[in-house]
Amino acid sequence: MIPTVLTAQRDAITEFDNRLKEFFRLKARGVDPDILDEHELGVRKAYKTYRDKGIRDGRNKSDIAWSKQEMPEISNMKARFEAEDGPLEDKDGDVILRTRPR
C-alpha cells in the first residue's frame, strides 16, 4: 500500500484543524495564560496559512470539499474560536495576529 502524502494545501488545512483542537484542549485544562497565549498565536498563524494556501480564500473547491469530509468539525471550531477568543480577520480581511488582552 502506498502511503498518502498530504499536498501543501491539505497540510495547511490539517495544521489549522490540529492547532484548533490543541488550543481547546489546553483551554479546557486551564493551562497557564502565557502558554494559552502562545497557542492562540499559533492558531492565528495557522489560520493565515489555511486561508491563503489551504483553501485559497475559498477558490480551492476540491480541498474545501476534502476538508468537509475529513474534518467536518473545522468550521464549528473556527466559529467557536472566534466567538470565545475574537475574530481571526479584521473588517478588511486581514488576519489578526495578536493574543487576547489580559
Image (cartoon, rainbow, N blue to C red):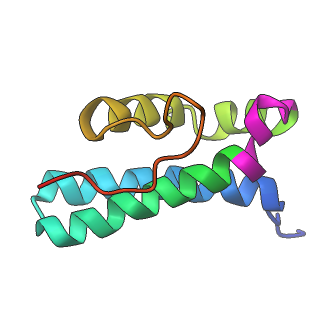
Report which quarter residue 41 is drawn in. bottom left
Q: Is residue 7 magenta?
A: no
Query: Is residue 51 left or right of 72 when viewed as pictured?
Result: right
The quarter of the picture where the N terminus appears is bottom right
Q: Main secondary structure of the magenta part?
A: helix
Q: Quadrant of residue 51?
A: top right
How far across and down, in percent of the image, does residue 2 sit? Answer: 90, 69
- The location of residue 88, given as percent across then percent down, is 46, 40
What residue sits 86% from the left and 34% below the top?
A: 62
The one of 50 and 18 positioned closer to us in this rendering: 50
Quadrant of residue 22 within the rendered picture: bottom left
Q: Name the outermost residue toward the right.
A: 2
Count the labels in the image.
0
Q: Nearer the viewer, residue 47 or 68?
A: 47
Q: Residue at x 26, y 55 (%)?
A: 25
In this picture, is 13 found above or below 74?
below
Residue in the image at 73% along x and 48% along y: 52
Looking at the image, which residue is at 13% across and 58% down?
29
Residue 91: x and y, percent?
51, 28
Quadrant (top left/top right/bottom left/bottom right) for the C terminus: bottom left
Nearest to the observer: residue 34 or residue 10: 34
Q: Nearer the viewer, residue 90 or 50?
A: 90
| Residue 45 picture location, percent across and down | 53, 60
- Viewed as shown, does residue 82 lie left or right of 90? left
The range drawn in magenta is: 52-61
